[in-house]
Image (cartoon, rainbow, N blue to C red):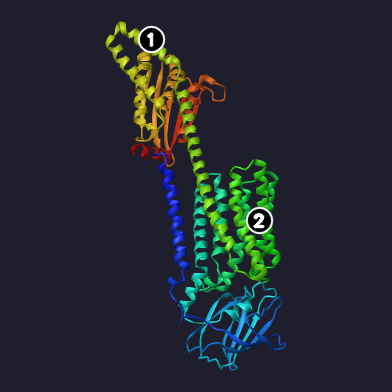
Amino acid sequence: MKRYLPWFLKTALCLAVIMTAVLAWRLATDKNSMVSADGLFIPVGLAGEYRINGGLWLPLDKDTVFNMKELQTFRFRGHLSSDIEKNMLIMLRIIDLEVHISQNGQKIYSFGEREKRHPLFRSPGNLWDSFPSPGITKEDEIGIELRNVYSDEYMPAVRYFLDSIHYGSDEGLWRMEIGRHGFSFIIGMIMLILGLLELIAAFELAMLWQPLAVRCLYGGGFSVSCGIWFAIQYSFISLIIPYPALIGTIDIISFYFLGLFFTLYIGTFLRGRRKRAAQLSSAFVLCLTLAVLSAELLGIRDAYDEPELLVLAVILAMLVSLAALWRECKSCGGGRLLWVFYTTLPVGAGIVIDMLRYMDGGNENTLWLGVGVFIYAVAQWSFTIWQFKGNAEASVREEQMKNELAQSRIAIMLSQIQPHFLYNALATIKSLCAKDPLSARNAVDVFAKYLRGNMDSLNENRLISLESELRHVENYLYIEKLRFGERIKVDYNLQANGFMLPALTIQPMVENAVQYGIGRKPEGGTISISTFEDSAGFAVEVGDDGIGFDPEAPNSGGRSHVGIENTRSRLKFMCGGSLEIRSVLGAGTKAIIHIPKEVEKNESSRSRR
């Protein structure tokens, strides 16, 4: 039962989400449950005639097709199908047109005059606009003049304008547009939010030096661009953002960035020639994007007035990347690459289909892209989370292995303590047993503490306090003084206390001072142990006035033995510290240990926790 319970919960959750979506769709599409907009948003027809560029007047009907392949002026005259009361709003759907409307020869409305357009954007906009009625009856003669601003117009803008004349209130317009494009807008905004979250994840991964960061960056850029492009449904977005030039530019530029990030994202899964093909496609789209932006900023051509060839070029670049991914899947035997291919294919195919439909007949419906985006969003986020989880687990395992390896190295280094001290200490205690049993017993106690300190150091993976290390040094010196007597003197100058350092850091330096310094002088000498603090950290100096050695001579005086190297390695690994040895032949030696202050503070706070 326990094994099947998680799968049951996941299945039930998915079923609940699907049932909720179906229920919402059923309720939204039921005409009986809709709030009536009658009297709020009423269509109006124009009956009469038209002419193009001053040509002959022709009869106007609902089936008239207006082709706009060059700059033209369309003039209409006739009568409206309904009376419109004074101050009632007349609402018009305008797509890149300059519009003038007159009533009985008197101009009552103008929109899109050249002097009112943005200097970097030729189009007056793709939007809904409105003006208050001066009071129009069916008998009034209405004149309409429409002029397209682009020489190559895909949208059947004139037909749209004539079919979308309404009067009523803003509320009715909002209801209609929300019903038509609200869902697409919401999907686009969700995609935008998911993309932003992915970009945030990419930034955090980059801070951790994770290789997945670049892929998340490109995937997030693609999701953001796709969300913006999908959310910009002109007839709806114009009711929210009253900046038609800005909307039009962002719409087109987001399409270029969509293609750019699409090819970059796919390129992260490719190798060799196929990766270079995707990179060339990305470079091509990026150059197109820069060219379009430069042309608009220089006032040469606005981004919205893009040639058909550029759109097809972006689509071709995306298809090249998809083809390269397919070839990569075939060469690698599928696996996760096949998953990536099948989740990105609907988006690429949806963009291609919708853009071709747009260029062919001006169809703004992005149905296929919406389906592709939905599939991509669900599948790719699942894939990214799964991959991120795998990378995180691998990083944890790698870190654990590094720590285990480091601890093994430390244990090996600590176990390499020279055996001569153990032999000498036991020999000294043996000699005391006969002549001074009490001193021998005390020596055994101290020697046991010393050994325990070394054994504890083998299991210590943190820094220890200065006081703990000095107690270990004192136990060592107690035993050495039993051998050398008054030949060993110790001088302490502790100006800094309370800081942390690796175990067995000072003791090996003191041992060197005894064995290679004052121990080789017949009269002995003095060992000095000093601590200091500066702005960068803490310093421990262990000096002796023994025989010294020549630092330039290889292995001079035996000073480069395993104790010094072990200490230097542990300082570097555990706290980023350092060890410096200075010596003058015949004058003595000084070992300087440096502990960085910030590392020491972090270790202290961690120890307190």
Amino acid under disc 1: Ala
Residue receiving disc 2: 318
Residue 427 is tagged as 1
Residue depicted at x 64% and y 62%: 353
Residue depicted at x 37% and y 28%: 469
Which element is circle 2 on?
helix
Q: Is residue 95 above or below residue 103?
A: above
Q: Nearer the viewer, residue 85 or 223?
A: 85
The image quadrant that residue 433 belongs to is top left
Percent across and percent down for residue 215 are 57, 49
Percent across and percent down for residue 400 are 47, 34
Amino acid under disc 2: Met
Task: Inspect this view and state whether residue 295 appears.
Answer: yes
Horizontally, is 429 left or right of 168 in the view? left
User: Mark 1 or mark 2: which comes first in sequence?
Assistant: 2
Percent across and percent down for residue 521 are 44, 16
Horizontally, is 66 left or right of 534 in the view? right
